[in-house]
Image (cartoon, helix red, strand yellow):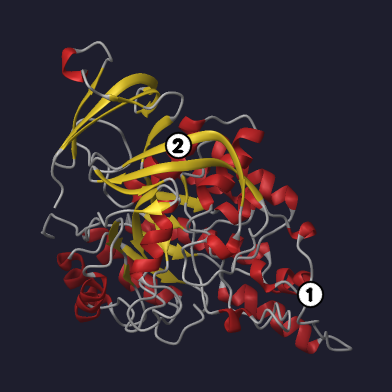
């Protein structure tokens, strides 16, 4: 599928050794060498001028929803959006498809649904739900890259949240399989306590369904605090690599850092929307901003940036979780009743770079958060996430100075609903190569180049 030769020179190539003036030599979809421009083997290279060459981004938190809910988002539309946003690999979450990816038979349905539709590479997480510990090894043998679970209700019936007892059973098996366990970390008891306090107050608390403040109050930071405390102890006792997804409470990165310093196998991510928006700025009656955990206050946002600076937050992933517009209850402005999820697959890179440069970060930081870090979580380091010999030729030609305004109507995701609509972001993807195939250039999709990624080594 991936044939031919490619020589690209950029004076701003982001490599594991920093930003360098080099020629990247590609043969049959693989980077075979990174050469100085005066090397005889580099003759004939295309000079990209002032444009940067970076490794394709890896997004390890994407809800594709196919099969079963392809009318929410499918493999074709999701991977089209991905390559337009500089993403060359996504890892699909085990929900909200039907069936959920919680056993090997369901995983086969996923693979069949993806066939012939991929613009970028796609890997898969398996799911941990009550009672499926026996399904985890078959899923690992089939090729999933790790597992995902919810401590609090997921929002869909097919993917039940786990209790602490469920995780005490499943975590040692995940550890034995030497794969990461990704956790939606909101403590259900904390959430239930908030509901109970509102029901039993005198007089009872009545929430305005259009109020963003009401949604924020219903999902307090304490739920993240309590969940993280449990997960640190679980990781310590079982040796399981636990990865906390979409950290929203900004100051919790210090807990992760301190646990890691004590030898606990725990890591975390945050998302573009938590780094971009702030609760104080979100208008009532606009469900586009609803997600769980919720977007918190500006102080929390800035604390997340500090966690990235301290390298205690290890990656940034989109948590692209779209749904049909009617489930967002846009006409009614019903924040409390709307589906919780933000669609940003195509926009996240620009949003994060816009915020990062304003805070003194450089392009190597963003590549570390959105390419190298996610590839390590998925066990793809050396293959994805870096411009180096032996890696897949997943490359992005990028103009870091180009500012553009998000026009939701022009996005490639299935439904054109996003809170980024009308917002200025920074950095324009000019070309995207997947395995050396030019799949996207200057706003046009050219040729599908994606494959399914399966874990290659059998489980012992």
Quadrant of the rendered structure where residue 5 is? Answer: top left
Q: Which mark is residue 457?
A: none
For the residues labelled 1 and 2, the Cα–Cα distance comes to 39 Å
| Residue 53 quadrant | top left
Secondary element at tag 1: loop
Image quadrant occupied by the C terminus: bottom left
Is 36 placed left or right of 254 in the picture?
Answer: left
> Residue 382's x, y, as percent?
24, 39
What residue is rendered at 37% in x and 72% in y? 74
Q: Residue under label 2, please give it.
A: 398
Of 152 and 172, the residue lying toward us: 152
Q: Position of residue 300 (x, y in %)?
A: 69, 51
Instruction: Judge from the rendering whether residue 100 lies leftward or rightward of residue 194; answer left or right.
Output: left
Instruction: Determine whether the residue tagged by mark 2 lies in a helix, strand or loop.
Output: strand
Q: Earlier in the sequence, mark 1 or mark 2?
A: 1
Instruction: Give the residue pinned by disc 1.
Output: 211
Residue 324 in the image, given as x and y percentages of width and height = 53, 79
Viewer-nearest residue: 179 or 290: 290
Tell which tag, 1 or 2, sits nearer the viewer: 2
Q: Is residue 48 left or right of residue 343?
A: left
Above or below, 185 against 266 in this view is below
x, y percent for residue 233: 45, 58
Given residues 154 and 390, the one toward you in this image is 390
Which residue sits at x=31%, y=58%?
Answer: 119
Q: Nearer the viewer, residue 50 or 20?
A: 50
Q: Residue at x 19, y 63 (%)?
A: 143
**Residue 325 visible in the snapshot:** yes
């Amino acid at each position: 599928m991936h044939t031919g030769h490619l020589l690209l020179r950029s004076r701003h190539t982001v490599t594991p050794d920093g930003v360098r003036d080099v020629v990247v030599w590609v043969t049959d979809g693989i980077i075979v060498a990174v050469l100085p421009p005066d090397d005889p083997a580099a003759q004939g290279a295309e000079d990209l001028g002032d444009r940067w060459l970076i490794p394709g981004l890896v997004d390890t938190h994407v809800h594709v929803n196919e099969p079963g809910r392809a009318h929410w988002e499918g493999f074709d539309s999701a991977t089209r959006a991905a390559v337009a946003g500089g993403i060359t690999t996504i890892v699909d979450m085990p929900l909200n498809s039907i069936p959920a990816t919680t056993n090997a038979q369901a995983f086969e349905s996923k693979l069949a649904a993806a066939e012939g539709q991929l613009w970028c590479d796609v890997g898969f997480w398996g799911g941990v739900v009550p009672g499926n510990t026996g399904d985890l090894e078959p899923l690992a043998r089939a090729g999933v890259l790790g597992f995902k679970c919810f401590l609090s209700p997921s929002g869909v019936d097919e993917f039940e949240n786990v209790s602490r007892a469920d995780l005490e059973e499943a975590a040692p098996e995940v550890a034995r399989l030497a794969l990461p366990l990704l956790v939606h970390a909101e403590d259900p008891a904390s959430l239930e306590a908030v509901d109970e306090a509102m029901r039993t107050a005198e007089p009872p608390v009545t929430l305005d369904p259009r109020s963003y403040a009401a949604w924020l109050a219903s999902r307090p930071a304490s739920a993240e605090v309590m969940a993280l405390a449990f997960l640190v102890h679980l990781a310590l006792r079982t040796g399981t690599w636990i990865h906390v997804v979409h950290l929203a409470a900004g100051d919790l990165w210090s807990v992760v850092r301190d646990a890691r310093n004590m030898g606990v196998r725990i890591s975390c991510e945050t998302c573009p929307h938590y780094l971009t928006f702030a609760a104080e700025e979100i208008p009532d009656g606009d469900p586009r901003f609803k997600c769980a955990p919720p977007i918190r206050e500006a102080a929390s946002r800035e604390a997340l940036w500090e966690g990235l600076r301290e390298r205690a937050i290890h990656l940034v992933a989109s948590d692209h979780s779209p749904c049909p517009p009617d489930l967002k209850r846009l006409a009614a402005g019903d924040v409390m009743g709307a589906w919780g999820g933000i669609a940003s697959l195509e926009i996240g890179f620009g949003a994060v770079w816009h915020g990062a440069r304003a805070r003194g970060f450089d392009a190597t930081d963003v590549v570390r958060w959105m390419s190298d870090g996610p590839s390590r979580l998925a066990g793809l380091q050396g293959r994805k996430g870096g411009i180096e010999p032996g890696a897949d030729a997943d490359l992005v030609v990028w103009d870091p100075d180009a500012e553009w305004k998000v026009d939701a109507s022009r996005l490639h995701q299935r439904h054109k609903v996003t809170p980024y609509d009308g917002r200025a972001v920074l950095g324009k993807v000019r070309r995207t190569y997947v395995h050396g195939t030019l799949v996207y250039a200057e706003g046009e999709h050219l040729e599908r180049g994606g494959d399914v990624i399966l874990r290659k080594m059998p489980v012992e």
